[in-house]
Amino acid sequence: MPISTLASAKEFEEKDHAEVEFVGFRYTGDQSTKTDRDLRQRVGYNGPPKFQADRVYLALLPTYLDPNHVENSNIGVHALESRTDFEVIYDAERLAGALLERNYLPPEAFYEGFDRWKRQKVMEKLDLDDAGRVFEKDDEEPYRDQLRAIAGVETDDEASVSTQRSDEYTSRFSRSEASEIIAVLREAQAPEPPFDPGAHTIAELEEELETDADEKWDVDSLNALYQAERLGDDRTGARNVLEDVLGDDLEPVNFEIDLESAGLTDMADHLTQFDPAVVEEAADVVNGDAEISDLTATPDSED
């Protein structure tokens, strides 16, 4: 759930030709998913044109554009307000609640390397105290405490967030879709192997790994090959070859969930380990709308 905005919005505001506000909006129509490319042109929203029902999307949208300096001065948040199938959220309490519900702090506003303009807009709108840059998940807690206070959410209530997300995934995805998304996330997490073991027969793989002592494959590369094989064809013969070469240096691959036997509920629960935005990106990869090379999949927490 990144914060979307037009690249020109910041420039126009810095020149006093625009006023831009941090808002949320959600699709309230009768479809489960709404594709609306017109929205991007009329509102100044620069994110994907697909909107899940009742999901809050975050954006920095123009509330005013000076017609004397901006050619398309009729775009902005008012175009959303005129729609009967979208709701604009200005209230800090609801915006804070949306961030907690999605279990996601936008990196461009909170994490190392943040965008100063976006950060300022978010901090001012939510009236957050600056608790420093976020480098890892544990660093989010000071901001989460403030968001809970703003949203009026008790700490214990946040434990239900994973359940809410799991229910959402169960209703959105079929078992096969959830399985494909998890497979994509696994592949994105895996280290890059020196070559694709699946492109070699067992004999070819064995020959490839037979080297002189001074040209021995390093352990990290061998384990990367082993994990790639497990994620790919998972051939018993190929596993045996790599296990023999690795010996005591073998790093077992623990998939946590068996995609062949697990049900949809178990898969949905597993997906809650990841940031919602990462799951959405993985779903885009499955649907052919994104490349796996653009995906960085790191679980929110270790099981």
Image (spheres, rainbow, N blue to C red):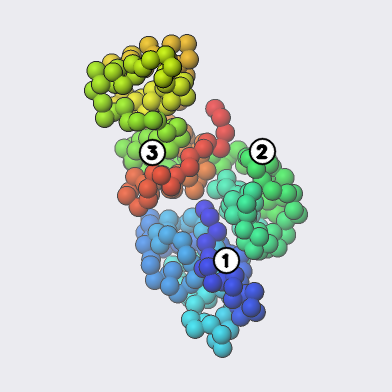
Seen from the viewer's position, the closer of residues 75 and 296 is 296
Residue 69 at x, y = what percent?
56, 85
Residue 11 at x, y = what percent?
59, 73
Give the crowd class for mark 1: few <14, some 14-19, many >=20 residues within 10 Å: many
Residue drawn at point x = 43 percent, y = 72 percent: 41
Sequence-wise, the earlier of marks 3 and 2 is 2
Q: Quadrant of the C terminus?
A: top right
| CB within 8 Å, label 1 to label 2 | no
Seen from the viewer's position, the closer of residues 97 and 227 is 227
Residue drawn at point x = 59 percent, y = 70 percent: 10
Q: Amino acid at mark 3?
A: Val
Residue indicated by mark 3: 184
Distance from Cα at disc 3 to Cα at disc 2: 26 Å
**What SS does tag 3 mark?**
helix
Would residue 221 be found to the left or right of residue 237 on screen?
right
Give the numbered dot on residue 60. 1
Residue drawn at point x = 53 percent, y = 65 percent: 5
Give the numbered dot on residue 138. 2
**What SS does tag 1 mark?**
strand
Q: Amino acid at mark 1?
A: Leu
Q: Amino acid at mark 2?
A: Asp
Residue 124 at x, y = what percent?
70, 63
- Residue 48 is drawn in which quadrant? bottom left
Residue 257 at x, y = what percent?
42, 27
Q: Is residue 209 above or below residue 72?
A: above
